[in-house]
Structure formats: structure tokens, C-alpha cells
Image: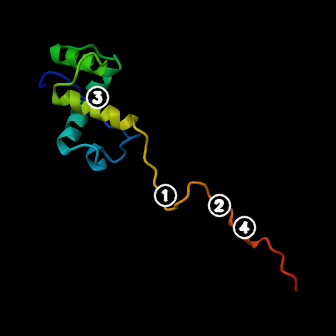
Amino acid sequence: MEKSFLSENRFFDNANYPHGFSRHGDFTIKEAQILEFYGHAFNELTLSKRKPINEEERLFVEVCKGLRQPKTEAEYVWLKYINCIKRPKRFHTLSGRQNPVNHLEDYNEIIDD
């Protein structure tokens, strides 16, 4: 992988990981480093903005297209990233109900003086 996936740009995904890959908890430190150093090249290869320069990159493109199962660590990490950004976001509330109930109905009695 030394000559493969070369890019002068680091990869950041501020939309899905605004605090970085390593701080979010989805990736190990090693996986986060792979994404930061090689993610820009991974993304360009996936979007066909860049042509593969060697066999390793050609096989990576095949994995991204679903023609082959991942075998290298880079392929596993990129597919894990793609799956993480495609899954629905979890939403937690402090309320036990999904729909708010109108509590004003309980106090609609008219009090006569």
C-alpha cells in the first residue's frame, strides 16, 4: 500500500464526522488513520474521478462496485465507512412518547365563582 492510494490531501468528512473519525467511536485508531491518510484516494477511486494506477487499486475498485469480496484492510475500512454513513442516525429523546399529548384538555373546565 506504500505506492497505492497516494494523495497529498487528507480525508475529512465534516458532515458525518465533524470531530474526526477517531473521536466518534465507529472506528479504531488504526482504521481512523487509514481513512485520514488514504480516504481521499479511496473516495476518488469510488467516484471514478481517478483511474487505478496499479493492481491493488484496480482490485479496490472491484470491491467498491461489489464484484469481489474485500480482502485487504483498506477495503474493509472503506466499506465500513460507507456502511456507517449510510445507516440511519439514532435519535434519543427524554420523553417516553413519540407524539406529544395536549395536556390542556384536562384544564378546560370552567370554574364558577
The residue to which callout 2 is attached is 101
Nearer the camera: disc 1 or disc 2:
2
Around disc 1, counting alpha carbons within 10 Å, would you say few (fewer than 14), some (14 to 19), or many (20 or more)?
Answer: few
Q: Which residue is at 20% across, 16% downward?
A: 59
Q: Amino acid at mark 2?
A: Val
Give residue 59's mark: none
Q: Amino acid at mark 3?
A: His
Q: Quadrant of the N terminus?
A: top left
Quick check: can you spot residue 105? Answer: yes
Around disc 3, counting alpha carbons within 10 Å, would you say few (fewer than 14), some (14 to 19), or many (20 or more)?
Answer: some
Q: Amino acid at mark 4?
A: Leu
Q: CA distance from mark 2 to mark 3?
A: 48 Å
Q: Which residue is most to the bottom?
A: 113
Quick check: can you spot residue 11? Answer: no
Q: Position of residue 30 (x, y in %)?
A: 17, 41
Q: Quadrant of residue 103?
A: bottom right
Nearer the camera: disc 1 or disc 3:
1
Q: Secondary structure at mark 4?
A: helix
Q: Amino acid at mark 1?
A: Thr
Give residue 40's mark: 3
Q: CA distance from mark 4 to mark 2?
A: 9 Å
The residue to which callout 4 is attached is 104
Nearer the camera: disc 2 or disc 3:
2
Q: Secondary structure at mark 3?
A: helix
* 30 left or right of 90 in image: left
Q: Which residue is at 33% across, 32% downward?
A: 82
Upstream in sequence: badge 1 or badge 3 = 3
Determine whether 97 is above or below 112 in the image: above
Q: Secondary structure at mark 2?
A: loop
The residue to which callout 1 is attached is 93
The answer to the question of whether label 1 and label 2 lie on touching residues, with beta carbons closer than 8 A, is no
Determine whether 92 is above or below 37 in the image: below
